[in-house]
Structure formats: structure tokens, C-alpha cells
Image: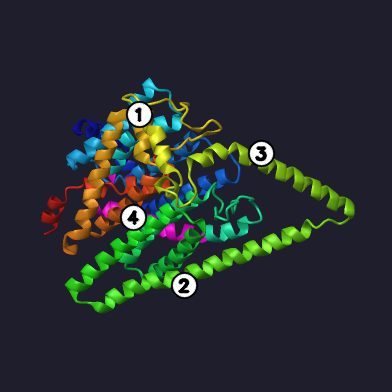
Amino acid sequence: MEWLQKFYILILNPFCNLSGKISPGVKKTCIYIICFLLYGTCYCWYSIIGMGTQLTLLSRMLESIFLIIVLIFLGLEKPLKPVKWNGLFIYCWFALGMLILIMGFFNEQNTGYWMTGPVIALGLPCFYMVYGKREKYELIFDAICKSAMIISIIYFFVCLYGEYISDNIWDATGRYNGLTIDANKIGELCLASFCVIVYYMLVGKQKIWKIISVISLGIIVGQTYLTQSRTTILAMLFITAFYLIIAFKDAIVERDAGRLARRIGMLVIPVIIAAAAVNAINFVHENYVAEAQAAQEPASEEAASTETETVATSTAAAGAAEETRAEYRDLVPEKGADLNSFSSGRLFIWQTYADGFNFIGNPSDAETPISPLIKQRTAHNSLVEITYRSGYITGAVYLIIVILTGIYILKVMFRSNRKNTDNDYFMAIISIGYLIFTSLMSSFNPLTAIIFLLYALGLPVILEKKEKIRSEDG
């Protein structure tokens, strides 16, 4: 990768003097603002789409690319020099991006997915080179954590008001969508914030932000409970288990039971806040429904007659809709019948996609018929989705990245805590959330999918040569 680093040096070094003229305090403030915008953008996009406004994937990516370019500029302090990375991981990461790009020439892909290739292969390594030093990506992590806390609290209150501006807050089955298009989307938002907030609760030093982290975590847990998103809940349980493992290991080594009690308490208090958040959401919803019903009461017999006709028409339309979904229901057995049913039909979806696997992938408009009337546009698994779109080789490279990430998580979890840095905990927690979520949902775009964005921003922790850094520190 030296040739790529030399290219970055050639392009970026002329801007070092300009960036260096910005005072450190102003630069740090700007980095926090940009991270807040980058994180908040994902919340905004998911909500705008959920409220019925159509946005192209390309438009969302361009906005995020601009913010990351600004971050790269702010990270320039002195002329860049070539760095050494974890060879296997960076080469697989680069190969993944290039394969997505190249296979896109053989199969017409939508612009957003096709652009994911060069972003992964060329754009993000540039970010890793600029923010490859520990103190730099620690700053990014801190900015992301505090952004998640603030945004999750603000979003909770916006969703409360959302009852009056969106008719998609709750779906027909009673699942909570917030302002997003469906429960799984708000589940992804909650999971991403849950990851970074739990990380801050584990390693954070500032008391005021720890208090805010407890509050925001409770709100997130409450919203997640209402989504009934089993994928998000499963990931949160694994992250909580990781948190407790690290906490118990610290307590055993340091013989500090008080610290362990405080850390456990920081998980108990959010449960109480979560109950309050659930009650607040339900209270607002019940009031809204009551007001809506009162406003719709027929003022005369004629109005009542009209309403009866409308209900009859709606019932007929609902019956027709049910008939169109009959075949799909046949493919997804009744709840509890088998593993396919328990997974909400995911096993069948994966098998359907796997039947279309080949070496060059499939175009974006290729049909993947779940039924003649329902075209499934997402594989509900990132590995399956990538393999289907970009072929066996691309899928295999992505699988290697997944395996390497899994090995990294196990190392962080089971080796001595003294061998881990705080940044190892950030990357491990994010990776747990990312791997579990993307095993059951498709979320593969580092500029628009918030859980993948966090995973991509945390990669400098895996890429750095830790042994060399420790020897210099010692």
C-alpha cells in the first residue's frame, strides 16, 4: 500500500500549512462539530425517508464524503510520512473496495452501491493515514460518543412530537418506528448509539458526560424495547456481556469491588429511565389517538354514513392486500413452526439469494423473487448481499474481514485487560454490534449506514502497529 500512501502524501501535504494556521482549540471544536453533523446526518436521513421524502443513496453519500474530507483537512498538522499498517487486514479492505468497483462494470449497479467500492478502497485509507495516531482517533471517538449522547436525547423528544407530524410512528403490528421508515431502522440507530455510549461508560473520565451517558442509554433501551427488534436486542445483550466481562476482569486484577458495583449500577439505572421513556412514549401516543378519535367523530348521520362506507372500502382494500400476501405467508410458516419462521423468513431469503450466486455478481435490477408480488430488495445479511451483488470472490474477501474482526474481538475479550487500550474496547464493542446486526440485516455502506460508519471509523485501532507504539511509550 506504499504507492497509495505516496499518492496521499503528494495530494495532502500542500494543505498542511493551511491547516496548521488554524489554532488547536478551534480545530478541536471544528472536529467535534463535524463528527456531530456526520453522526446526526444518519438520524436525519433515516427520518426524512421515513416521513415520505425520497432521497437517493448518492445524495446521502456525497454529503458524508464532504464531511469526511473536512475531517481529513482538520487532521493535517505536519507533512505526512508513510506508515505501517496491519498488512493482511488493509489489503483485504482495499481488495474488497476494488472488487465492488470492478464487478460494477460487469453488472449495472445503482450509483450508491457502486460508489461504495472506491470509498472503501481509496477514500477511507486516506482518513486512516491522517488519523492513524492514537491521540488523533481518540479525539474522534470522544467526539462520536458525545454526539451520540446528545443526538439520541434530542431524537427521543423529536419522536415524541413525531406523533403529530408523521403517520408512521407505529406500524400495524404495534412496533415502534420512531420517525424512521421501519422498526429495524430505528433499531440500527439505537444500536449504534448503544455501542458508543456503553464504551464511554466503560472508559469515560468526565463525570458530567457519564451522567448524560446513563440518561441517554436509558432512552435508547426504552425505544429499542418498543421496536421489538430482535436483531438489535440480541446485539445489545452481547455488548452488555462484553462490558461485564471487562468490568469483572478489572475488579479481579485491581481488587476494587466498589468500581465494579459502580459499573453495574450504570447498567441498572438506565433500566429505570427506559421504563420512564416507554411510559412517556405510550402516554403521548394514547393522548394523540384520543384526540384524533374525538376530532373524527361524525357530526351528523350523513357523516356517520360516509364514515361507514369509508370503513367498508378500507376493509375491502385490506382484504385484497391480504390476498396479495397470501403466497408470501405460505413461504413463512406460522410463528414457532420452524427456524425459518423464528427468523422471520430470513433462511428462505438467504436461500433465494444464494441460488443466484455466481462469480461476477448480479445487476441491481435483477429479480430476487420472494413471491411473484413481492420483490425482496435486501438480503438481510451483508455477506449474502455482497456475494449476490459482486460475486463469490468479493464475498470471500468480505468473509475474511469478518473472521479477522471476530478474532480481534476474542483477543480483546480474553487477554489481560492491561494489554488492551481504551481504543481496543471502542473497536471491539462496535465490531460486536456491527457483526451481529449485519448477520441479520443488510447494512453495507460506510457513509449512510450508521453501524458500518462507526465500524469504518474505528479501523485505525486494528490497523495500527501496537507493539511499536508501546515500545516508544515505554
Tag shown at residue 357: 1
Q: Which residue is mark 2?
A: 272
Q: Quadrant of residue 412?
A: bottom left
Secondary structure mainly formed by the magenta segment:
helix
Q: Is residue 403 above or below residue 358?
A: below
**Which tag is nearer the camera, tag 3 or tag 2?**
3
Report, in whole angstroms, how far the alpha carbon at label 3 lies from the one at label 4.
Answer: 51 Å
The kind of residue tagged 2 is Ile
262 left or right of 410 in image:
right
Q: Which residue does the image show at 14% across and 56% down from the upper left?
A: 470
Magenta residues (range): 129-154
Q: Nearer the viewer, residue 456 or 129?
A: 456
Viewer-nearest of labels 2 and 4?
Answer: 2
Residue at the spot of label 4: 141
Which numbered disc, 3 or 2, marks the residue that appears first in the sequence? 2
Residue 103, percent from left and from top: 34, 25
Q: Residues within 10 Å of mark 3 (few under 14, many from 20)?
A: few
Of callouts 1 and 2, the N-terminal one? 2
Asked which secondary structure carries label 4, the reply is helix
Which is nearer the N-term, disc 1 or disc 4?
4
